[in-house]
Image (cartoon, rainbow, N blue to C red):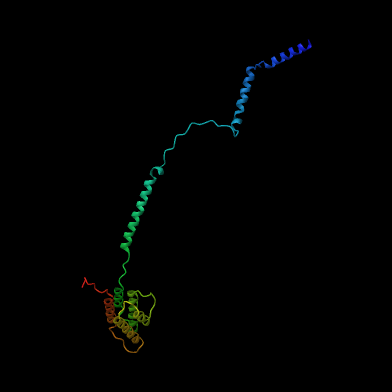
Amino acid sequence: MRGGRRKAEGGRRRAENRRPTLQTPHASHQSVSAQWSLLPLALSSPDAIPPLRPPKLALPPGFWEQNGLWISLTGLAALGAIFLLWRVVSRKTAPTIPPPATTARAALQALDPALDDAGRLAAVSGILRSYFIAVLGLPQAELTSTELCQALATHRKVQPQLHHAVTQLLDAMEHQRFSARTPAPAVVERALALIDQTEQALLPPPSRATA
């Protein structure tokens, strides 16, 4: 009897535990409010997924994406035109260097008539040395008359007749500078004649077709 009573009481208790508990409307409202109050905390957690936003429209191509190639080609063409213009202008404005013979003749003819004999001889000797250095491509150095004659003796373009004429004139002017005799008044004319002789000697030989 006791065992049967205990089984009945146990079954009654299990049935009572299985019955759903009814909640009052006030209790359910409080639970929903509590869940909404905890929503910001849930969203602030690192594992929370934020609400999705509508997709944005694709950005249109920018100015450089559309016109970058044409701008680069136009810039290169402009630089090329500027370079060509600079070449043309620089060729036109480049100073023309006169030939050594023209420079020497102008310097001899521009000598001051008031120069004394020693000054005139020194000026003519300097002009002739500068002329031969330029026309023969000798080293740009301050050569004396003796050094210039030695350089002319071994130069392949200078013939023996020309070397003799240059040496004779330069030696004569050197002796006249340091002597008590009055120098020849035609020293400028002799220097001009020597330049003409040098120009004729340095001319290339005429070809057979020209002859």
Q: In which quarter of the image is the N terminus?
A: top right
Please provide percent x and percent y for residue 189: 27, 81
Question: Picture quarter containing residue 127?
Answer: bottom left
Q: Which of 1 and 129 lies nearest the eye of the viewer?
A: 1
Residue at the location (32% across, 78% down)? 128
Q: Quick one: which residue is furthest to the right in this view? A: 2
Please provide percent x and percent y for residue 147: 38, 81
Q: Quick one: which residue is furthest to the top in this view? A: 1
Q: Which of 41 and 122 lies nearest the eye of the viewer?
A: 41
Question: Picture quarter containing residue 36?
Answer: top right
Question: Picture quarter containing residue 57?
Answer: top left
Residue at the location (33% across, 61% down)? 90
Q: Which of 206 and 26 lies nearest the eye of the viewer?
A: 206
In the image, is residue 3 above or below residue 88?
above
Please provide percent x and percent y for residue 11: 72, 14
Side (left or right) of 60 relative to 87? right
Residue at the location (37% across, 83% down)? 146
Q: Quadrant of the C terminus?
A: bottom left
How many labels, in total?
0
Please provide percent x and percent y for residue 205: 25, 74
